[in-house]
Image (cartoon, rainbow, N blue to C red):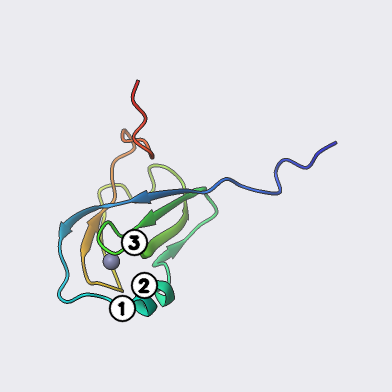
């Protein structure tokens, strides 16, 4: 038997930036910036401007339509609705 549930595949999804923040964040600010929400899902929402993780471990469809302000760069990001898929898979 192989333990398959041990490692969860994480998906990172850059959010749509609806307002750019003031100034440019340092690499430290981006690295040290803690997620605003932490869950147990597989999806990480990252800032579409600087790449800092805003929400870690989300499930698809959580907080959809919510606007989040990035703590690192100050940009306002919008969480997509559940109809959009991570990775932009074409069908
Ligand atoms: Zn940012």
Q: Say which element carries label 2.
A: helix
Q: Within 8 Å of ligand 1, the CB of disc 3? A: yes
Element marked by disc 3: loop
> Where is mark 3, residue-wise?
51
How far apart, in angstroms, are the residues tagged by discs 2 and 1? Answer: 7 Å
- The quarter of the rendered structure image containing the N terminus is top right
How many residues crowd mark 1 within 10 Å: few (<14), some (14–19), many (20+)? few
Tell which quarter ligand 1 is in. bottom left
On screen, 12 above or below 83?
Answer: below
Residue 18, quarter of picture:
bottom left
Give the quarter of the figure containing the C terminus. Answer: top left
Q: Give the numbered dot on residue 26.
A: 1
Question: Residue sitting at 36 percent across and 35 percent down?
Answer: 85
Q: In the rendered image, which quarter is residue 40 located in?
A: bottom right
Any atom of ligand 1 within 8 Å of the CB at mark 2? yes
Q: Position of residue 48 (x, y in %)?
A: 27, 56
Whether residues under marks 2 and 1 lie with C-beta atoms below 8 angstroms apart, the answer is yes
Name the residue nearer the viewer: 61 or 11: 11
Q: Are marks 3 and 2 in contact (CB under 8 Å)?
A: yes
Q: Which residue corresponds to the image point at 30% horizontal and 74% vertical from the top-left?
A: 72
Q: Residue at x 29, y 40 (%)?
A: 81
Q: Is disc 2 surrounded by few (<14), some (14 to 19) or many (20+) residues within 10 Å?
A: some
């Amino acid at each position: 038997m192989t333990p398959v549930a041990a490692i969860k595949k994480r998906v990172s999804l850059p959010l749509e930036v609806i307002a750019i923040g003031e100034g440019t964040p340092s690499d430290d600010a981006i690295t040290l910036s803690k997620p605003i929400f932490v869950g147990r899902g597989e999806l990480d929402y990252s800032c579409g401007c600087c790449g800092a993780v805003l929400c870690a471990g989300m499930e698809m469809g959580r907080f959809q339509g919510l606007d989040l302000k990035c703590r690192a760069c100050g940009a306002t990001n919008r969480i997509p609705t559940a109809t959009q898929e991570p990775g932009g898979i074409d069908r």
